[in-house]
Amino acid sequence: MMGIIRLDGAKTMLKELCDRRPVAALPIAGRYRLMDFALSSMVNSGMSHVGVLLSNKARPVFDHLRSGKDWNLARHREGLVYLPSDLDGQHMPTTLATIYHNLDYIKHNAADYVLLAQADTVYNIDFRPVLLFHQNTGADITMIYSKAPTDLPGDAVAMQIAGDGCVNDIAKQLTATKGSNDFLGIYLMGRDTFIKIVSTAFERGGTSLLVDGIIRHMNDYSIYAYEHKGFVARVNSTMAYFNANKAMLNKDIWNELFMGDNPIHTKNKDAAPVQYKDSARVTHSLVANGCEIHGEVENSILFRGVKVGPGVKIRDCIIMEQCQIDENAMLRDVICDKNVVISADQWLKGSENYPLVVAKGTVI
């Protein structure tokens, strides 16, 4: 198998968090980015060819992935490849167009199968059983899904699946309803089939791989669905991002994602361990290396290099890299993007159902 990663997702519902980055580059779980889950799952499944479809906000992607060394993809042959968009100076091309303009990379690849994944979802999947399922069913296309644990607002794709796993119908929806077959944006198909679908859809004026390449041609292909039964969190809104981070405080979810045989890799950053000062009080939280804690932190996630001053109280918050929270400030239900400064004695409070977002580099 070779892997292709899409950086786009439902970023329009993430507002300030995706003003300067694609959804795949969103920091999560204290030291990771969303793209780490798709990329690590591919590498752990034995893929040595991985292409990344670039968007118009690609600088954070280059900064994080670099040569792919942290994923063992910095190689003389194979390895990590960046697939650029064909900009016309006016419009950002669709994912379908970007794939089409990079078909040479796929045609000249020795892999028999192509796995395409969008990097806006938290999971840890071994794709090797998916390939075995694909081969045993004789499918042209295999689509990976999970059962929606609750109603999930935001763009969704639901599938109607027969008892043998064959997909009978596919529908785009505004909400994934509880118990529905929620498509995770991951396709597996033979290389020739993939090339045919992309070429046919694009050359006939299509803009969507799913709609123009698959849904409109369902009768032409054998489509099967593979269920992923592990933890999944789709990040398609600010609230979904908030909840996905908070889920990492559940030790069972943390162990499933990060402590198994297939680790999630990320960019290495050497830094000193966390400094817990005499006045620090930290409970049920994730605190990354390089942080300095004087105040109280509860039920929160602190990324690398966060400074928490004396008298500070942080509860139910996500504080990204290099933020500074000065003395006696109070934060609850707040997401602070990178390099935010909260001055002394400031009180910020969001809602349990809709956190307050402080944009990157803001000083309050």
Image (spheres, rainbow, N blue to C red):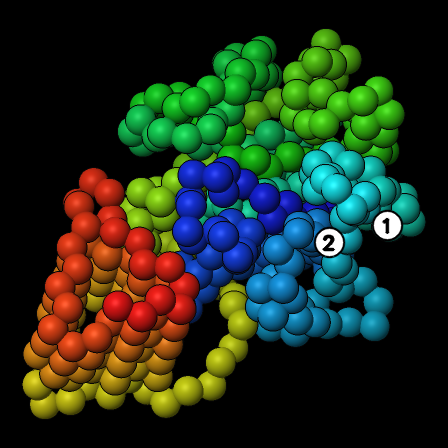
Type of amino acid at the residue the image marks with label 1: Tyr
Residue 223: x and y, percent?
Answer: 66, 20
**Residue closer to the observer: 106 or 129:** 106
Q: Quadrant of the C terminus?
A: bottom left
**Residue closer to the observer: 292 or 335:** 335
Locate residue 59: give its quadrant: bottom right
Residue 62: x and y, percent?
Answer: 65, 66
In the displayed structure image, the side of residue 249 where residue 161 appears, left or right: right
Residue at image coords 86%, 25%: 203
Residue 132: x and y, percent?
Answer: 65, 37
Residue at image coords 27%, 80%: 307
Q: Is residue 231 above or below residue 226?
A: below
Mark 1–mark 2 distance (CA, rounded to whole Å): 9 Å
Tag 2: Cα neighbours inside 10 Å, few (<14), some, or many (≥20)? many
Residue at image coords 75%, 64%: 79
Q: Which residue is mark 1?
A: 105
In the displayed structure image, the side of residue 152 where residue 91 appears, left or right: right
- Total marks placed: 2
Q: Which residue is mark 2?
A: 51
**Residue closer to the observer: 182 or 128:** 182
Q: Secondary structure at mark 1?
A: helix
Residue 95 in sight from this viewpoint: yes
Residue at image coords 57%, 25%: 225
Q: Secondary structure at mark 2?
A: strand
Residue 68: x and y, percent?
Answer: 66, 69
Q: Mark 2 and mark 1 in contact (Cβ < 8 Å)?
A: yes
Tag 1: Cα neighbours inside 10 Å, few (<14), some, or many (≥20)? few
Residue 29 in sight from this viewpoint: no
In the displayed structure image, the side of residue 160 where residue 8 appears, left or right: right
In the displayed structure image, the side of residue 243 where residue 329 appears, left or right: left
